[in-house]
Amino acid sequence: MSTRSLPGLLPLIALLGLWQLLGSPDSPFFPAPSSWWPALFTRGQGAKIVPAVLDTIRTFGLGLFIATILGVTLGILIGVSRQVGRAVGPTFEFARALPPAAIVPVATLLLGFDEPMKVVVVVLAALWPILLNTSSGVQELPPTLLDTARSLRLSRTRTVFRVLLPSVMPAIVLGIRVATPIALVITLLVEYLTAVNGVGALVGEAQRTFQPARVYALIVIAGLISLIVNSLVRSVEDGVSRRRVGDRL
């Protein structure tokens, strides 16, 4: 997380400080923040934290990676060929409109309660921002760009990797940035709904066993993961922007 983000955390810090002053560790709904961290390690449950965080990060990372590969590939195909876009457009619009929570029962029925099921749901949720941004980026490219590639007799592979991808990279990175929080939220949601290993599953377990302080502590952990991932994606986006500015100069 960059230092530029620190001032934005001041309202949250102030809220937690006020919560600490007014809250009580024994409150069934709003326990004081000072009781959150110790609640993670009560009843010998501290050993579950690190494996759960790693499971969540693995599912999120793998799902976002697969969604990026599929989204960029399909986005380029749709952006280059209007026929492909018209052929798959209605199907994609139907799939995009499905809420991820509605996909979970079908995914568990077909794949069971395991890691592949979580990854599939995350991919289906995170795919669309990347696909739509990529296809829009390709469609907005000047026609002379592809005409130049044809006149140079570049193969399709070289045209994609040397012309299309560098040109639409800002759109791809923007799509990834939009898809990143979606992928993380859906990862936690699937874990919560299915109790498959992860931070979301621990939140559901703590809620069912009436441990509010532990619930809040796990939510803070999920928020920290989100902040770190967001910072990394923003750094990549800034790097792509600086590179494009340097190329223009």
Image (spheres, rainbow, N blue to C red):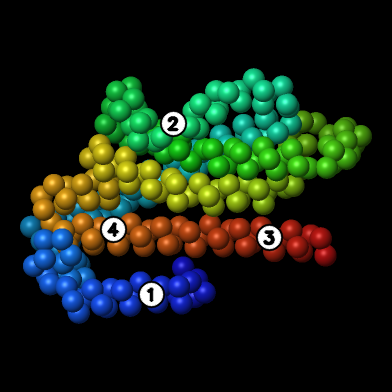
In the rendered image, is residue 111 in sight?
no
- Residue 241 is labelled as 3
Name the quadrant of the C terminus: bottom right
CA separation in Å, label 1 and label 3 = 30 Å
Q: In what element is the residue under mark 1?
A: helix
Using the image as rendered, state which of residue 236 and residue 227 is in the foreground.
227
Q: Give the quarter of the image for residue 137.
A: top right
Using the image as rendered, state which of residue 28 and residue 203 is in the foreground.
28
Q: Residue at x 33, y 57 (%)?
A: 222
Name the amino acid type tagged 2. Leu
Using the image as rendered, state which of residue 41 and residue 207 is in the foreground.
207
In this view, which residue lies farthest toward the top? 87
In the rendered image, is residue 27 in sight?
yes
In the rendered image of this protein, does residue 80 appear above or below residue 28?
Answer: above
Q: Which residue is mark 4?
A: 219
Name the amino acid type tagged 1. Pro
Measured as percent of width and height from the top left, residue 8 is found at 45, 73
Measured as percent of width and height from the top left, residue 70 is found at 56, 34
CA separation in Å, label 2 and label 3 = 33 Å
Q: Nearer the viewer, mark 3 or mark 4?
A: 4
CA separation in Å, label 1 and label 2 = 35 Å
Q: Which residue is mark 2?
A: 98
Q: Which residue is mark 1?
A: 11
Q: Nearer the viewer, mark 2 or mark 3?
A: 2
Q: Is residue 214 left or right of residue 59?
A: left
Q: Nearer the viewer, mark 1 or mark 4?
A: 1
Q: Residue at x 42, y 39 (%)?
A: 122
Q: In what element is the residue under mark 3?
A: helix
CA separation in Å, label 1 and label 4 = 17 Å
Q: Are marks 3 and 4 in contact (CB under 8 Å)?
A: no
Name the amino acid type tagged 4. Ile
